[in-house]
Image (spheres, coloured by chain):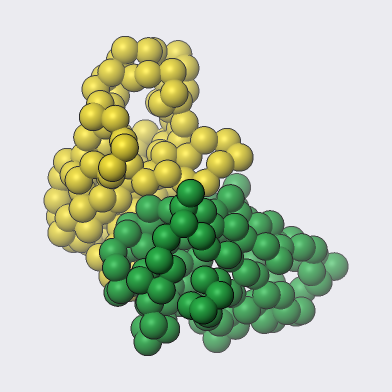
Amino acid sequence: DIQMTQSPSTLSASVGDRVSITCRASQTISSWLAWYQQKPGKAPKLLIYKASTLESGVPARFSGSGSGTEFTLTISSLQPDDFATYYCQQYNTYSWTFGQGTKVEIK
Amino acid sequence: EVQLVESGGTLVQPGRSLRLSCAASGFTFDDYAMHWVRQTPGKGLEWVSAISWNSGDIVYADSVKGRFTISRDNAKSSLYLQMNSLRAEDMALYFCAKDIIRGVIHGPLDIWGQGTMVTVSS
């Protein structure tokens, strides 16, 4: 299976900060990468797919970049609603795998 | 409103069986592949299984292959997961989720249910 490694595991930031989360794949996955946001007690919510395509309804402060094995999720100006856990997911092969998650918490 | 509602999760003894269901509404169910994903505090999110729109393509994670069976009834807009020979490591919150692409199994999951909890313990 392709292993997905996110960094950092926890990120402390303030409202208005620009934050970035990195996701690395153990082998190349082209651009077959999605990002999800999850809040406590809720299901994951799709933010970005195909590495950089913003899902409908997702605020433009979220963006994704990268290809191959290294990817980044950036929030341009952190809002109170953005404090959550973020996961990357590869779908390059018929054995989808998720990163371990990055918790974005209030500084 | 587009919605997925899982049910069937409960406490079950190791080695026993359980069937999860997922009722879909608000979209054309038989147009889309569907997935099961589970979540535990220790292992995070783990993809379990997927089925194409017409059940012609089915895939499983190695951890459940041979024990779990995914199926769907398009007439009832429902997805199922038959779980046999349950183990302690199968204990998790199970989500059903809709694939973003029509027809084939692709991978980004744009609609998720709220999850149903499976507890495996004697």
Chain A drawn in what color? yellow
Extreme-right residue of the structure: B122
- Residue B48 x %, y %: 49, 68
Tell me if residue A29 comes above or below residue A8 in the rendering: below
Determine whether, in the image, residue A9 is placed left or right of residue B108: right
Instruction: Name the residue rendered at 23%, 42% in the picture.
Output: A54
Answer left or right for A91 relative to B48.
left
Q: Residue B75, how many percent across, how many down? A: 51, 79
Q: Is residue B43 visible?
A: no
Q: How many numbered discs?
A: 0
Q: Position of residue B107 (x, y in %)?
A: 33, 63
**Residue A63 in sight in this render:** yes
Residue at the location (71% across, 66% down)? B8
Q: Is residue B107 left or right of residue B9?
A: left
Q: Relative to A56, does residue A62 appear above or below in the rendering?
A: above
Q: Which image quarter is the C terminus of chain B in?
A: bottom right
In the rendered view, tell whether residue B50 sits above or below residue B5: below
Q: Which color has been applied to chain B in this rendered view?
A: green
Of A27 and A90, the residue lying toward us: A90
Res A13 → quadrant: top left
Please provide percent x and percent y for residue B83: 64, 77
Task: Tell whether A76 sits left or right of A1.
Answer: left
Residue appearing at x 57%, y 36% in the figure: A40
Decide which of B87, B111 is in the foreground and name it: B111
**Which residue occupies 37% across, 34% down?**
A8
